[in-house]
C-alpha cells in the first residue's frame, strides 16, 4: 500500500500529553523502566513541566534533592534537546 493511500489522520504523529511525559519520569525514578535513572527521570519531568504538568513540577523539585548539580544540568540539556526536536 502506498503512503498516499493512507489517510493523513492515520499518519500524523499524535501529540503526547504532558501527563504521559510525567509518567515516563515516574517510571525512570521508580525503576519500572529498568534500573532507576534519576537523570532520565528528571529529563522527562522537565519536559512534562515545560508542556504544562503541575504534577511534574513537584516531582522535579523532589528529585533534584537527590541529584548532583551535574546530573541536574545534564537532565536540563537533554530536555532542551528533546523539546527543540519535538
Image (spheres, rainbow, N blue to C red):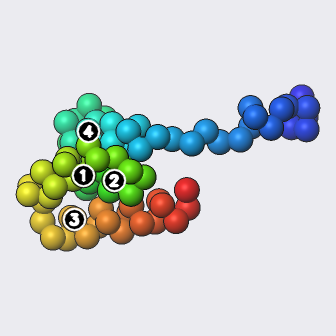
- Dot 4, crowdedness within 10 Å: few (<14), some or many (≥20)? many
- Which mark, by number, is residue 49? 2
Q: Which residue is label 3 attached to?
A: 72
Q: Which residue is label 1 attached to?
A: 57
Q: CA distance from mark 3 to mark 2?
A: 14 Å
Q: Is residue 32 visible?
A: yes
Secondary structure under tag 4 reads helix
Secondary structure under tag 3 reads helix
Mark 4 / mark 1, whichever is N-terminal: 4
Q: CA distance from mark 4 to mark 3?
A: 16 Å
Residue shown at the point (74%, 32%) measured from the top left? 10
Mark 2 / mark 4, whichever is N-terminal: 4
Q: CA distance from mark 1 to mark 2?
A: 6 Å
Secondary structure under tag 1 reads helix
User: Can you say which quadrant of the picture contains the C terminus?
Assistant: bottom right
Which sits in the foreground, 86 or 1? 86
Q: Which residue is label 4 attached to?
A: 26
Mark 3 / mark 2, whichever is N-terminal: 2
Mark 4 / mark 3, whichever is N-terminal: 4
Residue shown at the point (12%, 51%) measured from the top left? 62
Of badges 3 and 1, nearer the viewer stands 1
> How many numbered marks are there?
4
Q: CA distance from mark 2 to mark 4?
A: 13 Å
- Dot 1, crowdedness within 10 Å: few (<14), some or many (≥20)? some
Mark 1 / mark 2, whichever is N-terminal: 2
User: Can you say which quadrant of the picture contains the N terminus?
Assistant: top right
Q: CA distance from mark 3 to mark 1?
A: 14 Å
Amino acid at each position: 500500500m502506498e503512503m498516499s493511500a493512507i489517510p493523513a489522520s492515520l499518519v500524523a504523529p499524535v501529540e503526547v500529553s504532558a501527563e504521559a511525559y510525567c509518567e515516563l519520569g515516574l517510571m525512570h525514578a521508580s525503576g519500572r523502566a529498568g534500573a532507576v535513572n534519576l537523570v532520565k527521570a528528571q529529563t522527562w519531568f522537565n519536559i512534562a513541566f515545560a508542556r504544562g504538568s503541575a504534577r511534574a513540577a513537584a516531582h522535579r523539585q523532589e528529585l533534584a534533592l537527590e541529584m548532583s548539580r551535574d546530573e541536574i544540568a545534564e537532565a536540563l540539556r537533554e530536555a532542551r534537546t528533546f523539546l527543540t526536536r519535538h
